[in-house]
Image (spheres, rainbow, N blue to C red):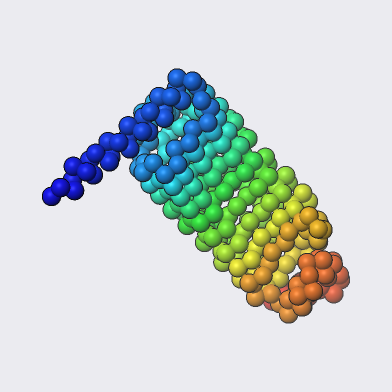
Amino acid sequence: MNSAPVSCNFVNSKMTRTKKILDEAREIKNPELDLVEKGLATFDELPGLLSMEFVTRLTLSHNKIRSIPSTVANLVNLEILTLFNNQLEELPTAISSLPKLRILNVGLNRLTNLGRGFGACPSLEILDVTHNKLSEEGLPGNFWMMETLRALYMGDNYFENISPEIGKLRNLQILVLRNNNINHIPRDIGNLTRLREFHIQGNTIQWLPPEIANLDLGGGRSIIRIEDNPLAPPLADQWILGAHHLLEFVKTDAYKSLYGNAHRTRR
């Protein structure tokens, strides 16, 4: 019987602390707002936030936020938006209209799609959608047009296929596709000549396209992770010897012939 007043006091205290943070930020025009682990469920609990055009960095990790209002578009100077570990199920189209957004982290949410037109983000360099419920059907048609992307984290989702259009992301340096159910890597991966980290461990991949040899992934500063895949024996044998051996092997005519035969059989 005595627990309700304590609970109400706690909620009021939480809202007071959050309001104080916003009031102070507004007063000094603080461009970086940290609202981590505040028990927030909705942007309505953040009065005036979406009119703070001076904000460049907004961190809302470890809350319980289910949706982002379209008025997020008012944050025209926002460069970094972090909503890691919330309860988001979709993203508003307005996200793609943020002109300066460079980094978006919506990992560990409940996203099944990224929303119509998401690929129109004009400045996005780093996108983290790790640990969601995304599949290829959840990506908008223009997703692979984000040529500004340098790092793409899509691990721990429900992807089975990756579009050949991935080859358009020519500025990509980090690509993480681990722990999905991907069984095929398109040959267009060879267009990503700036790639220095490639994580595809924990999928159902048997063969790698010969074009992967176009990528500089065998050097000391590069990373390729392909363990926990049912690799075909010729690849598995080379992987045991190391990444350099595997990448040299996929260049050979013998491997190209094996790969071609396997994919003719697959079709």
Q: Is residue 202 above or below residue 77?
A: below
Residue 219, horizontal then vertical, whole percent:
82, 58
Q: Is residue 200 left or right of residue 258?
A: left
Q: Is residue 174 visible?
A: yes
Q: Residue furthest left?
A: 1
Residue at image location 78% in from the left, 55% down from the top: 221
Q: Is residue 194 left or right of residue 3?
A: right
Q: Residue furthest right?
A: 253
State the residue in front, 237 or 33: 33
Q: Is residue 168 visible?
A: no
Q: Is residue 5 above or below residue 218?
A: above
The total number of labels drawn is 0
| Quadrant in which residue 35 is drawn | top left
Residue 82, horizontal then vertical, whole percent:
51, 41
| Quadrant in which residue 213 is drawn | bottom right
Residue at image location 54% in from the left, 60% down from the top: 156
Q: Is residue 245 above or below residue 32?
A: below
Residue at image location 82% in from the left, 66% down from the top: 244
Residue 264, horizontal then vertical, whole percent:
71, 73
Residue 189, horizontal then vertical, whole percent:
72, 56
Q: Is residue 191 left or right of residue 133?
A: right
State the residue in front, 112 or 128: 128
